[in-house]
Amino acid sequence: MTDFRDLSLQGLWKNNPALVQLLGLCPLLAVTSTFINGLGLGLATMLVLIGSNVTVSLVRNIVRNEIRIPVFVLIIASFVTIVQLLMNAYTYELYLALGIFIPLIVTNCAIIGRAEAFASKNKPLASAYDGAMMGLGFTAVLVILGGLREVLGAGTLLAGADRLFGDAAKNWTVVLFETDSPFLLAILPPGAFLAMGLLIALKNMIDAKLAARETAPKEKAERARVTAET
Amino acid sequence: MKLSLSSSPHQRVRRDTGQVMRIVIYAMIPGMLAQTFFFGWGMLIQAVIAVFSAVLFEGVILYLRKRPIERTLTDYSAALTGLLIAISIPPTLPWWMTVIGVFFAIGVAKQVYGGLGFNIFNPAMIAYVVLLISFPAAMSLWLPATTQAGITPSFLDSVSLIFTGFTTSGYDVTQLRTIADGVTMATPLDTLKTDLTQGLTYSESLSKATFNGSFFDAAGAGWGWVSLAYLLGGLALVKTRVISWHIPGSMIVSVFICAAVLHLANGDVYASPLFHLLNGAVIVGAFFIATDPVSASTTPRGRIIFGAAIGFWIVIIRVFGGYPDAVAFAVIIMNMAVPLIDYYTRPRVYGKNVTSKRGAK
């Protein structure tokens, strides 16, 4: 029986595709210049991840082991094409903003990684749940990174929300501060690397704190002196 | 006879880190005086801001890292980093940009890597590059030399410019850059770069106002004197053996040779070696920046390669790149290569790999 609680924990925290597995860094670093771009790509990746995980799980007993990778890639590519066409139809401006990084979801190692490591060995429902949790973990990092870079670089949050949520979202943009000289480093790719490094450091710090709390209440062990002074 | 026994090291350290850093700071004084004379009070105000915030950031981060604060602060390395940032940025840069640069130098380039002695990159140059990439417009706003400027900002005006963006009488930096007859002044390197894109030749560019009233045709007004003043301080550092001659020597020779080759190939487009040496940050970079003992190569042969490669990249990036000056980029590129250079230039260990007369390996 699959433990859904464990799957959520793995996808969102312990085995987070972006922070721990460091997969899919190319789109992660390239498009997270704003909150909305990050959210858009994260949702697209999550949809592909769920779809491909379910399909791979359904065909896992039919596909011969020798040709499984090409089949996985074909399945993923089909779902990416579907998502790309959907975005082209319904969120055209976001589609233009993300550009080449939508078709490049195919090459996102997080997706083929889950197909190979999880979906090809588990039942469809568990695979779908795993895809959703991994996708959610990835999206969370994209959104945090995008939000961080947008606030530091441009002083706004949720700029261009109408690209994803339609015209109703046009006035969602929060202006935190206005500046004539934006902090370009945060928007440029080097800023993405720096912010990503800081996020990973933050996660490791929280993990270390948690680990320390678990082991803390132990009493000090008595140590016998094993080396004598000569 | 009585022999005294003691454990190694037997050689007494003649100067500790703090002394070395203080000597470097003293050696910068002639250059800083020249810079203040030609480019106004701004640089000294920047120095106060940068040194203060560098020491503050260092102290706070050391506290957070639970490291000895007083001992580390008294090695003066943070102060020196702040000072190097202050002399390389435009004197009228808004104060908060300076502070951001200092934060990246001390917080990211130095302390994240483990503090003094562990930083791969030269902290001051990381600050410069972060600022140049983030605020390209503000970072290229140099005022003309005071010997030519229409309006020279006073001390109060400089303070006001840095903290509010305007002088006390309401001028901003862009207006101050315009000299009496309405010509906007740029740095020598900027002037040449712009002129070349507009189809002017090198010698035509030298007739521009930026180059008037200097002792060499090729040196921009003020800039040549500033470079010579830093050269004086740098030679004093070599003389007192705070730095070895290898890095500055090979760097200057390399800039000279690379520029000379290009200049001889096409003197209309490529500037003369003296132009490259006297303008921009080559001299100060050669003596004060590339010689950073932590991020530079440590072997004698390695230092020569390190300096020569920096000189090569300076000329290449200046001539073919998008930015007018390149010392910071060149130093950072070669900082990355230092482990490789050190690996291949390790001095022979005494008694190892001897090619003796007997032919033994």
Image (cartoon, coloured by chain):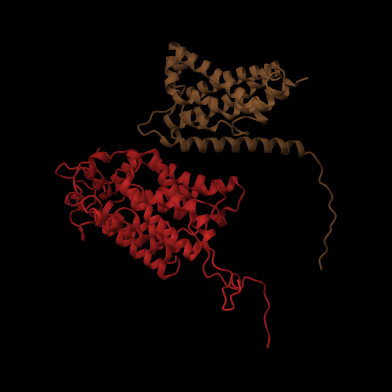
Quadrant the N terminus of chain B occupies: bottom right
Give coordinates of residue B203: x percent, y percent. Answer: 18, 52
Q: Residue at x 68, y 38 (%)?
A: A208
Q: Judge whether B117 appears above or below B186 on screen.
A: below
**Residue ID at (40%, 70%):** B239
Image-based side of B249 in relation to B76, left or right = left
**Is residue B209 shown left or right of residue A128?**
left
Q: Position of residue B220 (x, y in %)?
A: 24, 54
> What is the display colour for chain A?
brown
Residue B324, horizontal then vertical, whole percent: 31, 46
* Residue A89 visible to an observer of this rendering: yes
Q: Residue at x 85, y 55 (%)?
A: A224
Determine which quarter of the picture holds residue B137.
top left
Residue placed furthest toward the bottom: B1
Q: Is residue B284 above or below residue A108?
A: below
Residue A155 sits in quarter:
top left
Q: Quadrant of the C terminus of chain B?
A: bottom right
Name the one closer to the observer, B313 or B32.
Answer: B313
Q: Which chain is red?
A: B
Q: Position of residue A34 (x, y in %)?
A: 46, 26
Depth check: give the residue in front, B10 or A55: A55
